[in-house]
Image (cartoon, rainbow, N blue to C red):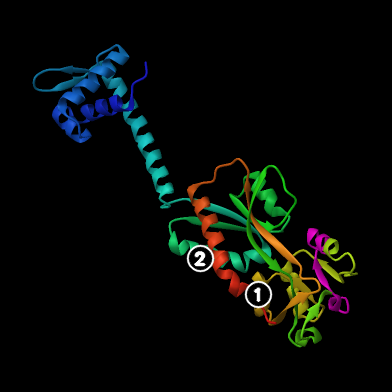
Amino acid sequence: MNPTLRQMRAFVALAKTGNFTLAAQSMHVTQSALSGLIKELEQTLGARVVDRNTRRIALTEIGTELYPLFGQMLDDLDGALANIAQQTRLKTGIVRIAAPQLMACTMAPGAIAAYKAEHPAIQVRLADCEVESVITRVLSGEVDLGIGPERDPAPQLQARELFDMPFALVCPQDHPLATRARVTWQDLTQHPFISLKGQFTERLHADMRDLALQPANEVTFMTTALAMVSSGLGVTVCLPYAEPLVNLYRLSMRPLEEPVLTRRFYVYTRAGRSLSPAAESFIDFLLRFVSEQRPATQDIQT
């Protein structure tokens, strides 16, 4: 026996009102249609749920047992459907993001603030972490999406390109390289070079096969590298999206040539996993936001 939703709604409406006419009005159907649904329910169950007379109806023993059960089931279903409708209309929802520490303190907050201006009811939670932890958090399901540099393809990951930017030199404003007409990677070998640990340095070495660029210091976070540069301990390189933080340290950012090396950043999600409407909406917004902000982000001093 499988009562339909319409049969259950008809029975609950009748039990609430105690009257066929009022129950039919509450369901926006005719009285005969409501009576037909009750008869179908009774045929499905093989038992009467209401006793009828000319003035009133009364629930049978079985009807009395079913009324709270059907009522709770319909309330739970209606609540779940209402919640889904709220999410699809972006009236509620949570987006969880993992981003490297440098991006988390430069580009990401502005993007989140702009998104929340359009969707104030959506919660956006940002986890700042080491670069190598971004993909781990995505694969574990700890976050809905991660933002990070290009990594080796993995079948369990889906990657959407966010931007492609060239490396830039960062040095003190009074540093000899700050006033050069042009700066090359070879010029960096004449000064203490502060690099990041892990794949950052490994990939630089792979790109610069013919250049002996040996770090004087390797640190975990770019904010540490910038603080060391600010203290006159050397120079570093980073991408133009970090310019707000570079300016905060009162440092100079210059384009690097011979060669022009770029890094791609991606939005990472788990392959084969459907995202919530809020997460999909945030990714679409982020791609648009970065595209619109990119000219200003790449306008470093030449």
Foreground of the two, 58 or 293: 293
Within the magenta stretch, is there residue 259? no
In the picture provided, is 237 more to the left or to the right than 246?
right
Corner quadrant of residue 149: bottom right
Q: Which residues lie in the magenta part?
A: 186-204
Q: Position of residue 236 (x, y in %)?
A: 78, 73
Res 198 → quadrant: bottom right
Q: In this orientation, which residue lies closer to the viewer: 84 or 186?
A: 186
Q: Is residue 272 visible?
A: yes
Q: Tell me where residue 20 sits by quadrant.
A: top left
Residue 280 placement (x, y as % from top left): 52, 51
- How far across and down, in percent of the image, does residue 52 sit? 15, 18
At x 63%, y 43%, the residue is 271
Pointer 2 or 1: first along the chain = 2
Determine the residue positioned at 38% across, 34% down. 77
**Mark 2: few, some, or many residues within 10 Å (few <14, many ≥20)?**
few
Secondary element at image label 1: helix
Where does label 1 land, which residue? 243
Q: Disc 1 marks which amino acid?
A: Glu
Query: Residue 113, labelled with which disc?
Result: 2
Q: Residue at x 62, y 48 (%)?
A: 269
